[in-house]
Image (cartoon, rainbow, N blue to C red):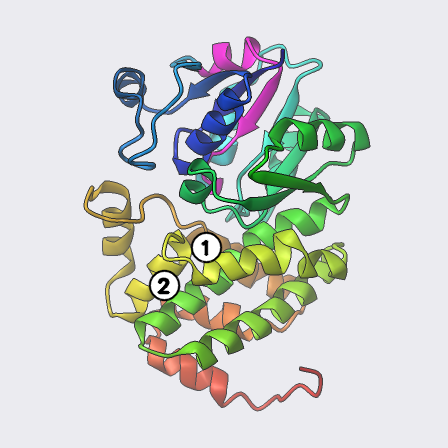
Amino acid sequence: MLSIAILGDGAWGTTLAILLAKKGYRVTLWGNFPEYLEFLKEKRENIKFLPGIKLPKKIKFEKDIKKAVLDNQIVIIAIPSKFFRKVIRRIKGVEIKDKIFVSATKGMEEKTFKRMSEVLQEELGKVKMGVLSGPTIAKEVAKETPAIAVVSSSNRKVAKMLQDLFSTPYFRVYINNDLIGVELGGALKNVIAIAAGISDGLGFGANAKAAILCRGLQEMIRLGKKMGAKEKTFYGISGIGDLLVTCISQQSRNRTFGQRIGQGEKMKDILKSMMEDSKQKVKGVPEGVTTVKAVYRLSKIYKVEMPITKEVYLVLYKGKSPKKAVKSLMLRKKKEEFC
């Protein structure tokens, strides 16, 4: 029986721990705050990120990240992209031969513009690895409502093994060999979801949401192709599938963050409350906040037109009002023939 370490005790990391423990695997969950791990061990409920869902007794908790990695065969990383590299550096020196690493993080590194698989291999070398992505709202998966996801790896055997690992009667997993596209789909859609949330916060309707989704998808495709991804990947699970759920779901952190921006709240206040206020229905780090910086700069490097991404960046980091951003989008001089 495989043994699995999950790095990250947020909503998604906890959900994956539950799913795998229920399948009978030996699961160890690590988090950055030892006192909270003790709380999880005692209460068997992640009230901060996944309230109302009981944690199976099979899940063990480990405060020592190196021990968690050393003692298990598969290491799943569900850490916000902002902290991804820092956490990976903490396991350097651990014997990792024959271990398989899985990135379950949807984001890009802010300063280097790298995908999480690139960060992982930069820090640990050429390890066996794969990624897990798709339209997966954590609480819905934890409640065992039907969902689909996709795994990708440059190693076909690893991809097939991960497909079998995660698959359940309520969680169907597909394989896509376009690693770049799968990762970019999971990251880029977060920026578009913030735009969709801003639209909601401004009180716009379904027409505006549809416009953001279809034009946002085109931005994702344009940049993705320039970066080596396959266009068809963006029409699949980790592209339009993830884009739809993240832009629509009331449980989406990025959409919720954008909605509050559209309602006039300040970014720093929103982020603080999403992490600290127990009354918030949606908690955790909205990946799009840091990802938009990387994507905006990548659009300049690759000379790709990404007007929605640009306006989200200007609203969050240059103080542009959401209403002016909408006006800029609607009155753009360039009108694409293909739509």
- The residue located at (32%, 23%) in the rendering is 33
Which of 99 and 82 lies nearest the eye of the viewer?
99
Q: Residue 301: x, y in percent?
A: 65, 62
Dot 2 or dot 1: first in sequence order is 2
In the rendered image, the quadrant that contains the C terminus is bottom right
Whether residue 334 is in magenta: the answer is no
- The residue located at (44%, 41%) in the rendering is 138
Q: Residue 226: x, y in percent?
A: 73, 61
In the rendered image, the quadrant that contains the N terminus is top right
- Span colored in magenta: 65-81
Which of 321 and 177 lies nearest the eye of the viewer?
177
Please report contact status of discs 2 and 1: CB closer than 8 Å, yes or no.
yes
Residue 152 bears which disc, if any?
none
The image shows a total of numbered marks equal to 2
Q: How packed is label 1: few (under 14 Cα within 10 Å), some, or many (20 or more)? A: many
Q: How packed is label 2: few (under 14 Cα within 10 Å), some, or many (20 or more)? A: many
SS for dot 1:
helix
Q: Residue 320: x, y in percent?
A: 35, 74
Task: Give the residue type at disc 2.
Answer: Gly
Q: Name which quarter of the figure residue 18 lies in.
A: top left
Looking at the image, is 66 positioned above or below residue 161?
above
103 relative to 163 in the view: left or right: left
SS for dot 2:
helix
| Residue that badge 1 annotates | 288
| Residue that badge 2 annotates | 258
Looking at the image, is 122 positioned above or below residue 263?
above
